[in-house]
Image: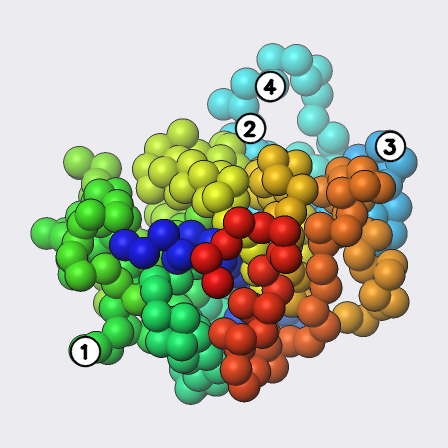
Amino acid sequence: MNSRSKDIIFLLGAGASAEAGIPTSAEMIGKIEGLLTTDEKWKRYRDLYHHVKSAIYYSAGLRGQFNNQVSYNIETLVNTLYELEKNEDHPLYPFIATWNSRFVALAGPDFEGVRKFRHLILEALKRWMCPEDTAQANYYYGLATLQKDLNFPLHVFSLNYDLCVERLEDHDFRVETGFTGFGSRHVWDWERFEDAAPNPPPQILLYKLHGSINWKRDEATKLLFSVEQVENIDPDRMEVIFGRDFKLEAADPYLFYAYEFRRYALIAKLIVVVGYGFGDAHINKMLTQGLRDDSNRQILIVRKQDVNGDDLAHDISTRLELSVTEKHQVVLHPGTAKVFLETPDLAKLLLQKIPKGADAPF
């Protein structure tokens, strides 16, 4: 594989798929709050939701975080519900004298209400990840055009569960996901991401850091495979890092993908970030490590700016814990994912963004 393919890597966040009809994590909260008001199946959990949300904000307030400083989205909500659902099985249970009496009343016997509410949210999540009009995601074909113009495989790291990148695959354009096909006979294999195999190399190597809506794990062997239809995947068994014990799972493919992202963040000359809100501490630390490893390395952030550009750059630099001398490595590119991926001569634009002092073969 041509070594130039490692000079530019991509990191996709929820904002990258927003224009494809897939709501962002924060937008999902708005949908949930709407359903809690209008849908009879959801109304029974409205008071429980308000209680849990208030507790999350209260906890943040004790740490000196208020208003927009509070990282509250659907992932925060489901993670909290998952921990509460454990009840007596939670390792901290012996240290808690009594649960909040109002919460106990809202949660129901054995906290069954918490489990059912979380299940309902995950059912909705699966629907939101599968919009009826997949053509809305056609702007992702900009990645295919970019790959052909650059003429080397693209390394795309995604935090999303959707299938927008996978749908680029056709008879002459291959997206490597670690599977040779669909079904339990085609289990995930890390070696498919190695430089030497398979040959010839794919056009895109896709690393789904937080899992995928179409992944399924064999209950007996624990081996991972993918399916074409997601309807038969139980919401509680979806293979997404969402409401789990640890954000960074000590298992493959999650561990392998995290390692690969760290490795490429230390190799790439330009890290192109599209639609990521910098709310993931693990990802942020690896980005920061990459920037500090090489003062010439830059991170190009494609994001719709609803605030002053300088303020946004300062906020991102703060989240990455960059020093004053490191902030120049953060470069903003205002605009949506659709506008960016449909940019004429996108390859030329990115090649021009390669840091001048970098030892790059362009």
Task: Identify the disc placed on residue 171.
Answer: 1
Q: Secondary structure at mark 1?
A: loop
Q: Quadrant of residue 227?
A: bottom left
The span from disc 2 to disc 4 (Cα, nearest Å) is: 7 Å
Q: Are marks 2 and 4 in contact (CB under 8 Å)?
A: yes
Q: Residue at x 46, y 57 (%)?
A: 361
Give the amino acid at mark 2: Asn
**Viewer can see residue 139:** yes
Residue 349 at what x, y percent from top left? 58, 74
Which residue shows up at 53% across the image and 71% down it? 17
The dot on residue 87 is 2
Q: Which residue is mark 3?
A: 62
Name the N-terminal-most of marks 2 and 4: 2
Secondary structure of residue under mark 2: helix
Checking the image for residue 93, the label placed there is 4
In this rendering, the label closer to the viewer, 3 or 2: 3
- Quadrant for residue 68, please give it: bottom right
Q: Nearer the viewer, residue 86 or 110?
A: 86
x, y percent for residue 201:
23, 59
Q: Nearer the viewer, mark 2 or mark 1?
A: 1
Considering the image in quadrants, where does the N terminus appear? bottom left
Q: From the viewer's perspective, is 168 left or right of 218?
A: right
Three-letter code for the amino acid on which mark 3 is drawn? Leu
Residue count near mark 2 (Cα–Cα under 10 Å), binned few <14, some 14–19, many ≥20 = some
Answer yes or no: is residue 159 visible: no
Which amino acid does the dot numbered 4 rest on? Answer: Tyr
